[in-house]
Amino acid sequence: MQVGDVIEVGDVSGTVTRIGIRSSTVATEQGSEVVVPNSHLISNEVTNWTLSDRRRRTDIDVAVAEATSPERARELLLQVARAHPEVLKEPEALALFVGFGDNALNFQLQVWTPAEIWERVASELRTAISRVLGEAGIDYPQNEVHLASMPASVPELLAGRGPADGASRSDKET
């Protein structure tokens, strides 16, 4: 580990800004500086996101309505990834069809970004995915509820007409 590395240890995640004899300092994304005893770094698992490489893979899960063409969904996800200027060209972005959900087709977009900005890039990609899928007329999964029976007044209430006797709620309250 060295100054400038992006690490995770326990519930602390950030950039190493100082390494001392007894402790090290990690600057978090939230702007705080956490002093971590070096004994904690030695005795616990440390994930170093930048030890040998300053790239980080970001995985974005996306579910679309089951009527969606899987090929079209993958094509749109890759289009979004390729259009983002901070998504690295190598390794190439992948759009994987990972399974079936409740009324859904589940995909995972995997992209590589500079490690220091992965969260911002992931957020920007999610925003772009939402926009592009909407423009393409692709819906998100929806659950339908079928009622086997209901009181006679429910359809009128759902239609906004009030109780069957024609009186509105405000008429009854006065």
Image (tube, rainbow, N blue to C red):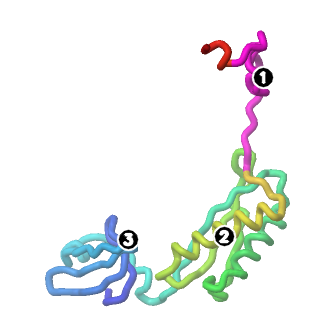
Q: Quadrant of the C terminus?
A: top right
Residues shaded magenta: 141-168
Q: Quadrant of the N terminus?
A: bottom left
Which quarter of the figure has residue 132? bottom right
Which quarter of the figure has residue 62? bottom right
Residue 143 in magenta stretch: yes
- Disc 3 to disc 1, how far (Cα)? 50 Å
Q: Say what secondary structure mark 1 lies in.
A: loop
Please name the amino acid that badge 1 sits on: Arg
The residue positioned farthest toward the left in the image shown: 22
Magenta part mainly helix, strand or loop?
loop
Question: Picture coordinates of residue 29 (x, y %)?
Answer: 40, 74
Label 2 sits on residue: 109
Number of other residues with Cα within 10 Å of mark 2, as a class: few under 14, some 14 to 19, many 20 or more? many
Q: Which residue corresponds to the image point at 18% horizontal and 86% vertical from the top-left?
A: 20
Number of other residues with Cα within 10 Å of mark 3, as a class: few under 14, some 14 to 19, many 20 or more? few
Taking the image as shown, residue 99 lies to the left or right of residue 113, namely right
Q: Say what secondary structure mark 2 lies in.
A: strand
Question: Picture coordinates of residue 35 (x, y %)?
Answer: 22, 75
Q: Which mark is residue 30?
A: 3
Q: Which mark is residue 161?
A: 1
- Front disc: 3 or 2: 3
